[in-house]
Amino acid sequence: MNLATHLLWDGFRNPSRTLLRHATFVKSIRKGVLAASQFPEVGGQPVCQALDEVFVLHARPRREGWVPKSPKSMTAAGDKPAATEMLGGAVASENPVGYRILLGIPRRA
Amino acid sequence: MNDKQGPVLGISAFYHDSAAAIVRDSEIVAAASEERFTRKKGDASFPAHAVAYCLKEAGIAAKDLACVGFYDKPLLKFERILETYVGTAPKGFRQFLMAGPLWIKEKLFTDRQLRDALGYEGDILYAEHHESHAASAFFPSPFEEAAILTMDGVGEWATASYGAGRGNDIELLKELFWPDSLGLLYSAFTYYTGFKVNSGEYKVMGLAPYGEPKYVNLIYDHLIDLKEDGSFRLNQEYFDYLSGFTMTNGRFEKLFGGPPRVAETNLTQREMDLARSVQDVCEEVMLRMARTVHKATGLENLCLAGGVALNCVGNGRLLREGPFKRLWIQPAAGDAGGALGVAQLAWHRHFKQPRTVTPGKDKMRGAYLGPGFSETETEGFLKAVGAAYHRLERQPLLEATARLLADEKIVGWFNGRMEFGPRALGSRSILGDPRSPRMQAQMNIKIKFREGFRPFAPSVLRERAGDYFEMDCESPYMLLVAPVKKARQIPMTVEQRRLWGLDLLNQPRSDIPAVTHIDYSARVQTVSRDVNPDYYDLIREFEKLTGCPVVVNTSFNVRGEPIVCTPKDAHTCFMRTHIDALVLGPFLLHKMEQPAWKETQNWKQEFQLD
């Protein structure tokens, strides 16, 4: 299901909730980015260059039952976690909803 | 130093039960919870005092550390929180407004916080929350290989996980994911029965035997879809923890026929039945999970950690009815233990250091990993406060203390290094005579100032445990519940059988009534001489006087207060309560000899009720 289909389907089922949900979400993201921009320089870099740790935010389907664990991981500070780790073990193709939002979080100092 | 063989510091912080632990040469040098130093129960702040203590105990500075480990991954946790807000929007917006800025301004920058607080420039490693729990369960265990099961409220995404440990590494195979959480199901009932979430769960467990499992079917029909493999789906229509400020919602209240009990109001049969019902469900989930883990790993030993592993009634059933031959449970099974877990994970996995196992003997040193105080320090304190005390040699001190206990006196026992984990294990304990039918009420009301239904636990000489309890294994950390031996039980009379709820209290159930719960169970601590010789010999002296190798052991604190850490904490608790005598290292203090205790403020307001 792509984003348009999802929005249509969700909107058809509950129009007011869908509108509110997406409005709130967009506002939240804006707030997050604004907050991130309060740090003009992080780790000695301008914040725009430091946005190399990126959240891939999913409308993820609920994962039920015993789910296989992603490969063992122990990350050091500054290491960019692997995509699978960032997603808690899920890979992008597991997301049938289809929309994803990129939210920049400044690199950890 | 700062090489790969250097010591490793583990830290858990910023959620609840902050703690620090240090590992060197595969040995746990020190571990302590921050709450014991700050005197704030469940303190979640950066564990500055615990870190300072651990470094001091190891005789090093932060710059000497090979690395610092943090017990979870803040970025993944933040991802879960954001996605939950998105998934429930706009409902959780108020919650987001409260939590969001804190995350964006502070919690995402854990690295910087750790470095600033420690003055440390070396490596910082992050393990996943349940990996830290799993590591704390397996690495100190007495097993060369074992299955591992972790269960708690939630870490980053996982709420439970299982896998196996072999040699010097662990591998987690599968996880259960948020929002399906056994810990949160139990916490929902903790909230609903009027207790505090994250600390009142053990009260629900203690209340359960007073009730009937009347609501079990309702829970299965509406709240939890439990699968044969122990996985489950919680019906979020009845819970509020995804987007609200409470655990349960109006629909939950409608299902169980009323609003949550207001804290500190009278307990009714309903709360007891609810407690019993959720306890039964919890045990069933634990058993099914254990069977799945056994099937998946084919191993005979099981290691447990995570907050749910503090459910000693469930642990007892796992041992008796589960598929594993042996069980080992991390005594600091909650989040504090994560500090120890990540330190050990860094030591063994990251630095590839070998792990040695002594069969039958774990690496926890009896959990006596906290601060200890010298005779000079203790006497200096006693002189400073003008306390009346007697210094005794070891044997006369043990004999005098045993005599006091045999005379039904209540004794504060402060000896050696403080325990790591929520249980007092004979280092920071209040002791009593288990044979006394009055002891439970007296200790609950006059000493602990807590609810009268709360049971007390027995400490029993290891080799005599089988004479008193239906168990043939060690339980050094008071994490297993076992029935009192049939021959020692006092059957209920016809009149007693007609009683319900709290009316069942104060009816002697065995020849050790103070530690026998109303269902004839006891949360047993077995005491071995090689682990705690002073405590062992004290119980032995008590046995010589009375023939009973058991004492009542409850934590040295009052309700809402963290367990005492220093001689000052112990002396203050002793003077504020009706404890008859205090043993502080080699010093014995009798209450009747003490100068009058004066406090300008009402000390009972000092601690928030738990």
Image (cartoon, grey):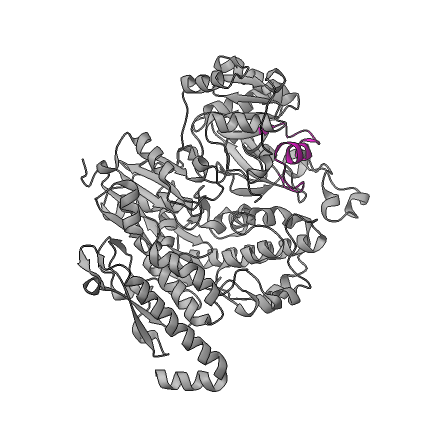
Residue furthest right as drawn: B495
Give yes or no for residue B8 being in the magenta stretch: no
- Comparing A90 with B261, the one in front is B261
Q: Is residue B159 above or below residue B527?
A: below
- Comparing A21 with B376, the one in front is A21
Looking at the image, how many numbered discs can be counted on the residues? Answer: 0
**Residue A3 seen anywhere in this rendered image of the structure:** yes
Give yes or no for residue B446 being in the magenta stretch: yes
In which quadrant is the N terminus of chain A drawn?
bottom left
| Picture quadrant of residue A54 | bottom left
- Taking the spot 37% from the left edge, 37% from the top edge, the residue there is B50
Q: x, y (%) of residue B376?
A: 41, 17
Q: x, y (%) of residue B362?
A: 39, 37
Q: Is residue B454 above or below residue B153?
A: above
Q: x, y (%) of residue B568?
A: 48, 26
Q: For this view, does B218 lie left or right of residue A100? A: right
- Taking the spot 28% from the left edge, 41% from the top edge, the residue there is B118
Q: x, y (%) of residue B388?
A: 55, 15
Q: Is residue B504 above or below residue A33?
A: above
Q: For this view, does B208 lie left or right of residue B300? A: right
| Picture quadrant of residue B57 | top left
Q: For this view, does B128 lie left or right of residue B274? A: left
Q: Is residue B404 above or below residue B426?
A: above
- Comparing B119 with B226, the one in front is B119
**Residue B362 seen anywhere in this rendered image of the structure:** no
- Taking the spot 51% from the left edge, 58% from the top edge, the residue there is B184
First to last magenta residue range: B431-455
